[in-house]
Image: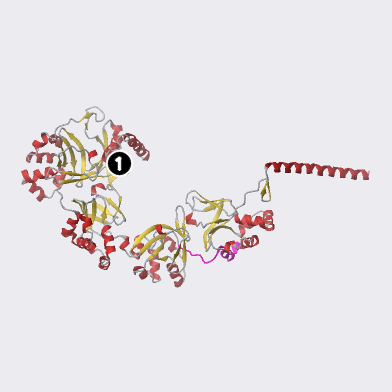
Amino acid sequence: MGLHTCLFVAVALSLCLCCTCTASYFDKILLHSRIRGSKHGSNVCAVQHVEGTDKKYFSNCKQWYSRQICGNPTVVSYECCPGYERVKNIEGCTAISPIVNMHETLGKVGALLTKSYSNQSELQLKLEGEGVYTMFAPSNEAWQLLPMEYRDALLNNINVELLNSLHYHMVPQRLLTGDLPSGTVLTSMYEKQPLYINHYRNGIVTVNCARLVTPNFLATNGVVHLIDRVNQPVSNTIGDIVDHYEELEQLGKLVNKAGLLDMLSADGPLTLFAPSNAAFDKLPQSTLKRIMNNTDELKALILNHVLHTMRCTESFLGPTPVHSAEGAKLTVNCDAIGHKINGNINIQRKDIVATNGVIHIIDELIVPDAVKDMVDVAETYGVNEFTKLLTRVGLRDRLSSGDTLTVLAPKNEALEELPTMPQYELKKLAEQHLVQGRYLSRDLYHGQLLESLFGTYLRVFVYHRALCIENACVDIRDKPMRNGALFILDGIIRPPTATIIDILSSDKRFSILVNWFTRSGLRKQLREPGEMTLFAPTNEALQSMAPAKLAHLRRNREELAEFLGAHLSQGALVRGGMVPVGTNLVTSTKGTPLEVKVEKDRSVTVNGQKVEETDLMATNGVIHVINGVLDMPAPSQEMQGDQPRSPAAAAILRRLVSFQGIKNHALRYSARRRVYRRRA
């Protein structure tokens, strides 16, 4: 099934849930599976099985369409939705499952070991008797995954340890998934120890990070949810575990030094990606020492491992973005082997549940850009050609010093086309891409001047869909680093050194245009400060005009000024600031519309005329070279000079012209008759 089916299901879901806006995420996913399975009969649900495992999921449209969960291929089967059974020779699942007591229900959901242990620990009588309960029943596989020594300890003390363990999985009330919103803390039947519920948008529901595999099996005296692991009582906060767990000794020292232990011990929910002791050995010791000696950097490092939400590993079914307490975007993904953060950091031990969240132990530090040197961050984002340039001209160490700078790094492709130039020119180019001070995009405004390390001032242009520094526009922005910030540009910055008229005067292609600006009296305007965009026709383009029109413009200074003004607009519009799809509407200084378009082949046209060259940057604007001219609108018949006539005046004029024509014809006829008479 394709995208159209997904859209149909989305509409069906919205219609089905319009009267049940409080439906839980799991209920919505179950409804999605029911709609998917409806073609196989009533009460049939589509279930995705992960190939090579016993795992199965009621999936959402994303997993259904990709046919993958955690990167592993899935096989779809069609099973009876919870609470229904098949009847022989009848399509679908038409029979409602008979409701029996909880002890018998354990057998129906396949929790045979939990049922057996209930018999041995004398819990059976309670499960068969009066009262109402919810039981999160571990599956057979869950019991088998327990360490042998722990399971033996339970089975060797059936009436105490095993019974306590089973009671910890029970709550003295009936709770369906719709009664289990995320963040719910339940009181178990074992010494009122808490159970922590998380209910995720993808329909996954967990209790102490154990996934509800088969939820909502009703019994006469409660409900059974089958879960995929055996839970153990929780009594420590994340801070307690970090402060006393031997494998996290190095992290504990840094947390205490940064003064963040109280934060990790306070109410959650929190998730901590906790680097192991071995993870710290992978970080250069000089870097670690520098961070430890700077409280702000140390806090940033630790907070980059914290989420202000509880994310159990079972909640990740594919690449999932999350945001750290430091503000960085992290991506958690999963595959057949396990879970990774940002593609290369492995979760070695998962789902250590605490009273205020969960801990996952990882094998590397997640170092935020805010504590990295500029060179390291630049290389992280793939602008290594610029870092090579900095090394070549002797500026690399400057970026690793204490100076606060904003790096405007051209992408690799732009620098690969850099022509050969002397060393001093290369250094000048590099310094013109380093701005003194730390700027993020929120600090920049249109017309702002940024002082480069070379001493030149760079203009900021802000457009609807682009942020540009002179002619180069920003591809990636706002990457903070220890002593500054990084922007990645789509090209090399070319700071202007001359005005529009000076650039035209120095280029032989525009000798006629310069002459016309001089004759029209507009030359001075092109030398004044400001922001202008000139669509400049070349000599060839001007000479291609009709000879009569050329002669007319040369004779009429006012019309020549009108013609040139139609090629000039206020404001600087650089190539990167143009809307990539659609039309950029610009008004010339004479009020005529200019339609600037970026065509499918990435070429640029203005009013249909092709732009041969873009972004000749001037101190007072920008020049785009065109291969034609932008004509003024043709004057209407009701115009005389620049002054329009009223319709009545125009009608009188037409009558006068007509009368004068008749009169002239009569005079010519009379003159001819006199000539004929004399000859006769």
**Residue closer to the observer: 664 or 106:** 664
Residue type (three-letter) at the residue carrying disc 1: Asn
Circle 1 packing at 10 Å, graded few (<14), some (14-19), many (20+), is: many
In the picture, measured across the screen, residue 276 lies left or right of residue 159, that is: right
Q: Quadrant where the C terminus lies?
A: top right
Give coordinates of residue 212: x percent, y percent: 21, 42
**Residue closer to the observer: 423 or 661:** 661
Q: Is residue 29 magenta?
A: no
Residue 169 seen: yes
Residue 361 seen: no
Label 1 SS: loop
Give coordinates of residue 639: x percent, y percent: 67, 47
Give coordinates of residue 358: x percent, y percent: 21, 51
Colouring scheme applied when the structure was drawn:
secondary structure
**Residue closer to the observer: 513 or 87:** 513
Using the image, determine if residue 188 lies above or below residue 480: above
Give coordinates of residue 441: x percent, y percent: 40, 58
In the picture, measured across the screen, residue 667 lies left or right of residue 498, that is: right
Q: Quadrant where the N terminus lies?
A: top left
- The residue identified by callout 1 is 60
Q: Is residue 503 magenta?
A: yes
**Residue closer to the observer: 386 or 458:** 458
Residue farthest to the top?
A: 89
In the picture, measured across the screen, residue 219 lies left or right of residue 328, that is: left
Residue, x 19% and y 31% (percent of image)?
97
Residue, x 43% and y 70% (percent of image)?
427
User: Total label count?
Assistant: 1
Magenta stretch: give its range: 492-510
**Which quadrant of the figure has residue 283?**
bottom left
**Which quadrant of the figure has residue 198?**
top left
**Which quadrant of the figure has residue 73?**
top left
